[in-house]
Image (spheres, grey):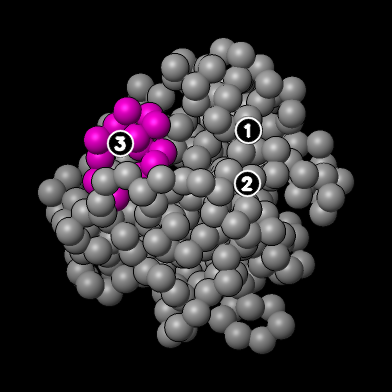
Amino acid sequence: MKLIIDTDPGIDDAMAIAYAAAAPEFDLIGLTTVFGNTHVHQSSRNARFLLDKLGLDLPVAEGAPFPLGADKHVPSDHVHGPEGFGDLTEIPEIGRNHDLPAAEFLAEMARKHKNELVVCAVGPLTNIANAMRLDPEFAGNLGRLVIMGGAVYCKGNVTDHAEANIYHDAVAADAVFSAPPETVLVGLDVTLKTLYETADFEALAQKSPGMGSFLRDISRFYLKFYKEIGGLEGCGLHDSTAVIACSHGAMFDVVETGLRVVTEGDRIGATQPDRDRPAVRVCRDVDGAGVVRLFTDRVASLP
């Protein structure tokens, strides 16, 4: 499966990229970056750093610095740390970004790999909306779009109504859902059923001294946030669950519904069913223990 991850690394993004690199089901052909957990230039630097750590020579195409119609963004450094990787603050600049911006790169890759390319979007949907606007054939050329985002049948995590990726660019998300490609939404309805605990990270680090230890170390900041804010003893495998959904759909229970995103007012970012819109597949339940095992098994194979 040819895969591009649209990402804002981010601790859980790093976990998802490591999983994709280890999983034999995927031919990871590049990363596109967006604002979100970090500023976009940090996202790109972190993406290149991760690929270098994984021994992968793949393009990183930098995308949107801000939400549609905005000229600023405040990163989620209270969740992911000032540079995106918890307490790790000295992250080297390795290599350079691809010549094409993210939206153009996505459109070009979708044309090149028509009906074969899967894009897994684990940040705000600005790059996806821009690719759809840039190339009217983009949605039809994609094999599938898998989104980590939304809280359709549960509470949000930024507000009671909204999940972070959708909230950070509600206008872009609503544009994507207004005329979506074949889409699977992997939101908080399922990702909070995939808790990865301190003991899981320790076991992973023992099996994978390089990448596993790196993920354990940067996750300490993330786990502390989950404990202090939610009283949880682990972190959701949010982005990794979306990547797993790209290839292991049988692990998920889904419903089909159109979606609309509230773009203004107190409920901004809310992801609501709308029967008048094209249907997407919304994940409502998951084999959480199975996802945790699969993540560990795959990533443990890395050096």
Question: Which amino acid does the dot numbered 3 rest on?
Answer: Leu
| Residue 162 picture quarter | bottom right
Looking at the image, is mark 1 or mark 2 earlier in the sequence?
Answer: 2
Q: Position of residue 85 (x, y in %)?
A: 56, 46
To which residue does mark 3 refer? 28
Quadrant containing the C terminus is: top left
Image: magenta residue range = 47-60
Looking at the image, is mark 3 or mark 1 earlier in the sequence?
Answer: 3
Q: Are marks 2 and 3 in contact (CB under 8 Å)?
A: no
Q: Is residue 17 magenta?
A: no
Q: Is residue 225 above or below residue 22?
A: below
Q: Residue at x 55, y 58 (%)?
A: 37
Q: Secondary structure at mark 2?
A: loop
| Residue 125 picture quarter | bottom left
Q: Position of residue 71 (x, y in %)?
A: 45, 83
Looking at the image, is mark 2 or mark 3 earlier in the sequence?
Answer: 3
To which residue does mark 1 refer? 217
Can residue 182 be seen here? The reply is no
The Cα atoms of the two marked residues, 2 and 3, are separated by: 25 Å
To which residue does mark 2 refer? 86
Question: Which amino acid does the dot numbered 2 rest on?
Answer: Gly
Q: Secondary structure at mark 3?
A: strand
**In this image, 71 relative to 119: left or right?**
right
The Cα atoms of the two marked residues, 1 and 2, are separated by: 8 Å
